[in-house]
């Protein structure tokens, strides 16, 4: 599903070029549930954005579903994200003062063709995350856990191949954390590929496989 | 639904979430467009008034009067100045090219005219036949003054419409006898209706008689109060004006360095005169329009930039779920267009209202024209694009990962 070969990432913000990622080689199969662990600042998000085609590596090869991603232009990457990738973020990133349903439908706006059954699909994914009775609530009227569930529903609307979740429970209490991890577990059981980024061991333990990021490399590959 | 329509709907939706910001931007545009519209209306109104005057007086007409008002450069019309004589007319006709016709004129204001028991005060003009063509002031009824009338100093006259009304009411005046300054004259025609001049004078309150009769039977004035000239080719007007001036200075033996003892009124003078107060108002409004459009543009740009900073994560999330750079650009441009369209409409109606008020208060001539409306709409579209494109580009080109950081 995902193949990364000798990926390097260097931010050229300051004069000193510090490589954040250094020679990352990994491979993730379809249907796998993988956790990427590491301390804060170790480059987990950077890696996830690169794997999710939101950012480009400085060097290296990246293949997604057998397609070489490295050479694609920005529009092609956008289309790819739209069709094949769902993102969930620590800060939820919903549109404020916008209903749960409209938030969930957002990716369809940028789809090649707007589906006729958009509303049904929106309701369906909201039901999948247990929010069938919150469809018309505004994002800011929902609790943190509920907002994150809307974000997961939004990630699901285009029926993506991979879901990337960057510290999805980082802003949640233990109750909501359990709910979110439960949903991700279910999605995995349905056969979706899930990549979760976290610094929290107990969260990472829900995955099938843990990659640990240290000094810009995949330092350790563990099976829990 | 095409992608662009979907994006336009997003623009509208996001605007609905930020009504205050949108209102501020619209207000900025409205003020700019209002002053632009008003400026266009006022200058159109003023222009029409001027062209009306020039066309009525004739774009090929030169008027020469004795004396000069140093201040305005316009004829003083002072009766004490005796400078123009009939020989000047012959000299001009003889020495200056490009002249179609020239006529001497003598006139006096507030002359007593009586018909039976009716009495009025009017202006008497002594003219020659060609005067009617030069001033485009022929008879409406009856005959104009003929060469014979001139030769015989006939006591014949034509009366203006105001005089007709004052002395005759509904009666048919032609053939009747009136007394001008106690001298009997036979009415041989009625003059065309001309209305009020740009100077506010009633051009129909006049009687026209042969210039010879004027001098021999009414007043002993030897000097002229006017020479009127029409030129052949208006493109050569400036040269003709210069030549006429040279000939007259020569005739009057004015040495170089001395001022003219006559003044010419040209079509350009008429334009200047008619523009009058409007011109400074137009300049003021143009200034205001330019400044306020600039301010509007800057307001839009800054509000947009601020909103982009505030909407960083919105842009980031759109990019993450598959929006292309171009989609973001479109969203912000459409927002700018809608803001300026509605702001522009608001401003246009404000400006048109201002125009109606200005002209009804008689501050200046002002006219709402399709051109003013088109200019207003075009300008606000332009502002939206020019000042909206930079923030929109900025929004679109942000790296999504930077917009998705805490
Ligand atoms: N846009 C950027 N410009 C420069 N440095 C960056 C940028 N984004 C992240 N970094 C740096 O890269 C490192 C890894 O960041 P990140 O991937 O966010 O770490 P993590 O998600 O593991 O906490 C950090 O040291 C961070 O300061
Ligand atoms: Mg991170």
Image (cartoon, coloured by chain):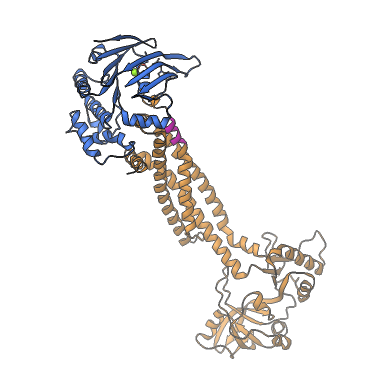
Chain colours: A blue, B orange
Q: Name the quarter showing ligand 1.
A: top left
Query: Residue B240: x, y in percent?
Result: 74, 66
Image point (74%, 75%), residue name: B223
Dominant SS of magenta comes to helix
- Out of A107 and B96, give the one closest to the viewer: A107
- Out of A198 and B192, give the one closest to the viewer: A198
From where the camera sits, is residue B41 visible?
yes
Relative placement, left or right, of A122 versus B265 is: left
From where the camera sits, is residue B406 visible?
no
Relative placement, left or right, of A142 versus B28 is: left
Query: Residue B191: x, y in percent?
Result: 59, 81
- Residue A20, located in which quarter of the rendered image? top left
- Residue B70, located in which quarter of the rendered image? bottom right
- Out of A111 and B369, give the one closest to the viewer: A111
From what the image shows, is residue B270 above or below residue B378? Answer: below
Asked if the stretch drawn in magenta spans residue A92, the answer is no
From what the image shows, is residue A14 above or below residue B282? Answer: above
From what the image shows, is residue A47 above or below residue B384? Answer: above
Asked if the stretch drawn in magenta spans residue B396, the answer is yes
Relative placement, left or right, of B371 versus B126 is: left
Split into 4 quadrants, where in the image is the C terminus of chain A? Answer: top left
Split into 4 quadrants, where in the image is the N terminus of chain A? Answer: top left
- Out of A207 and B333, give the one closest to the viewer: A207
Q: How many labels does the image show?
A: 0
Outermost residue, front side: A66
Query: Residue B151: x, y in percent?
Result: 73, 87
Q: Residues in magenta? A: B390-397
Image point (45%, 32%), residue name: B394
């Amino acid at each position: 599903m995902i193949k990364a070969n000798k990926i390097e990432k260097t931010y050229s913000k300051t004069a000193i070029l510090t490589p954040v990622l250094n020679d990352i080689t990994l491979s993730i199969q379809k249907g796998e549930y993988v956790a990427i662990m590491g301390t804060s600042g170790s480059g987990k998000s950077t890696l996830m954005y690169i794997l999710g085609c939101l950012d480009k590596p400085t060097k290296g090869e990246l293949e997604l579903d057998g397609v070489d991603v490295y050479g694609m232009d920005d529009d092609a990457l956008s289309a790819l994200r739209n069709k094949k990738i769902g993102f969930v973020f620590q800060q939820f990133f919903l549109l404020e003062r916008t209903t749960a349903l409209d938030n969930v439908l957002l990716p369809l706006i940028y789809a090649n063709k707007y589906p006729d059954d958009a509303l049904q699909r929106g309701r369906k994914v909201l039901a999948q995350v247990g929010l069938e009775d919150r469809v018309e609530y505004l994002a800011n009227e929902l609790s943190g856990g509920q907002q994150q569930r809307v974000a997961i529903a939004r990630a699901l609307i285009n029926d993506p191949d991979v879901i990337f979740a960057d510290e999805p429970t980082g802003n949640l209490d233990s109750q909501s954390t359990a709910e979110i991890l439960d949903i991700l577990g279910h999605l995995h059981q349905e056969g979706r590929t899930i990549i979760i980024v976290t610094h929290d061991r107990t969260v990472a333990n829900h995955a099938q496989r843990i990659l640990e990021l240290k000094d810009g490399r995949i330092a350790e590959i563990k099976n829990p | 639904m095409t992608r662009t329509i979907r994006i336009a709907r997003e623009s509208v939706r996001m605007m609905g979430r930020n009504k205050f910001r949108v209102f501020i931007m619209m207000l900025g545009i409205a003020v700019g467009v209002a002053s632009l519209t008003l400026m266009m209306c006022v200058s159109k109104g003023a222009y029409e008034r001027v062209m009306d005057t020039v066309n009525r007086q004739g774009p090929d007409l030169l008027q020469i009067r004795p004396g000069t008002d140093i201040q305005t450069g316009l004829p003083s019309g002072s009766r004490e100045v005796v400078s123009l004589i009939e020989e000047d007319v012959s000299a001009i006709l003889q020495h200056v090219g490009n002249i179609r016709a020239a006529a001497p004129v003598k006139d006096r204001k507030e002359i007593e005219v009586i018909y039976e028991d009716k009495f009025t005060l009017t202006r008497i003009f002594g003219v020659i036949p060609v005067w009617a063509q030069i001033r485009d002031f022929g008879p409406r009824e009856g005959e104009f003054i003929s060469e014979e009338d001139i030769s015989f100093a006939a006591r014949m006259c034509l009366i203006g419409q105001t005089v007709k009304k004052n002395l005759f009411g509904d009666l048919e005046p032609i053939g009747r006898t009136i007394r001008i300054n106690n001298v009997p004259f036979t009415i041989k025609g009625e003059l065309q209706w001309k209305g009020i001049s740009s100077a506010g004078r009633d051009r129909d309150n006049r009687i026209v008689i042969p210039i010879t009769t004027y001098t021999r039977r009414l007043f002993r004035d030897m000097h002229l109060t006017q020479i009127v000239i029409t030129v052949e080719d208006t493109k050569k007007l400036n040269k003709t004006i210069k030549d006429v001036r040279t000939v007259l200075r020569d005739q009057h033996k004015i040495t170089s360095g001395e001022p003219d003892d006559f003044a010419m009124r040209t079509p350009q003078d008429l334009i200047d005169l008619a523009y009058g107060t409007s011109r400074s108002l137009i300049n003021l409004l143009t200034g205001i329009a330019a400044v306020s459009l600039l301010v509007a543009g800057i307001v839009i740009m800054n509000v947009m930039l601020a909103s982009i900073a505030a909407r960083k994560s919105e842009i980031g999330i759109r990019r993450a779920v598959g929006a292309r750079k171009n989609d973001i650009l479109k969203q912000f441009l459409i927002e700018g267009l809608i803001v300026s369209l509605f702001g522009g409409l608001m401003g246009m109606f404000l400006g048109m209202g201002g125009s109606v008020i200005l002209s009804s208060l008689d501050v200046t001539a002002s006219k709402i024209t399709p051109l003013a409306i088109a200019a207003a709409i075009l300008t606000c579209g332009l502002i939206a694009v020019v000042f909206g494109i930079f923030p929109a580009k900025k929004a679109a080109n942000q790296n999504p990962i930077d917009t998705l950081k805490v």
